[in-house]
Image (cartoon, rainbow, N blue to C red):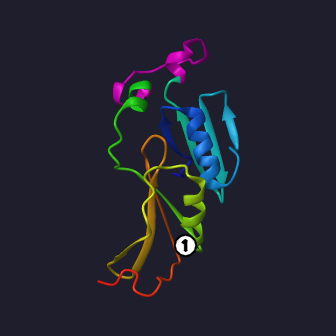
Amino acid sequence: MHLGSIYLIVNDFEKAISFYEKLLEMPVTSRNMSRFASFVFEGHRISIMNGHFDTDHPDKVVNKGEYTDWADDLKNIALSPNTHKFVLNFLDEDLRREYERVKSLNISETLTGIKYVYNVSPYYYFQLTDPDDNVIEVTGAYTPTDGEFDE
């Protein structure tokens, strides 16, 4: 088995594409009308699924097989509250620089500061959410300033 794509079912397709184009610093790689879009980079694929497309355009979609609400009711999935059980994790070689870049984009109202956790080794990261409230974590190399994270 191979990973084909991680895709997010979104409420506002164009807003999600704009967010990820800015965050990933790349244009969307491919689109299937306004139903599905993918970003392909470094051998990985993150995709955006418009939760409203199938309901809004029944003439453009053919579905066969058993219908199940929990998997097939894309509109209600897109409108459901996000429970934050899924996190997209990205790595950057210079966490401080990436934090400043993401902060300057002003694409999320929930951007945290840089955080630190230690279990086996130090782990530095920051978090933000996308337009559908999916959690994104960015980690990477980081050297704290004097006094930062002191107890």
Percent position (x, y) of residue 77? 39, 31
Up the image or down, 132 lies above or below 26; here it is above
Taking the magenta stretch, the answer to whether it contains residue 67 is: yes
Is any part of residue 76 visible from this angle? yes
Amino acid found under the numbered disc labelled 1: Arg
User: Residue at the location (34% across, 36% down)?
Assistant: 81
- Left/right placement of residue 26 relative to residue 9 reads right
Percent position (x, y) of residue 100? 57, 66
User: Residue at the location (70% across, 39% down)?
Assistant: 30
Percent position (x, y) of residue 148? 40, 81
User: Residue at the location (45% across, 21% down)?
Assistant: 65
Q: Which residues are magenta?
A: 53-74
Q: For numbered disc 1, what is the local secondary structure? A: helix
Residue furthest top in the image: 59
Q: Nearer the viewer, residue 149 or 127?
A: 149
Percent position (x, y) of residue 105? 60, 54
Is any part of residue 44 visible from this angle? no
Up the image or down, 24 lies above or below 141; here it is above
Residue pointed to by mark 1:
96
Query: What is the quadrant of residue 71 in the picture?
Result: top left
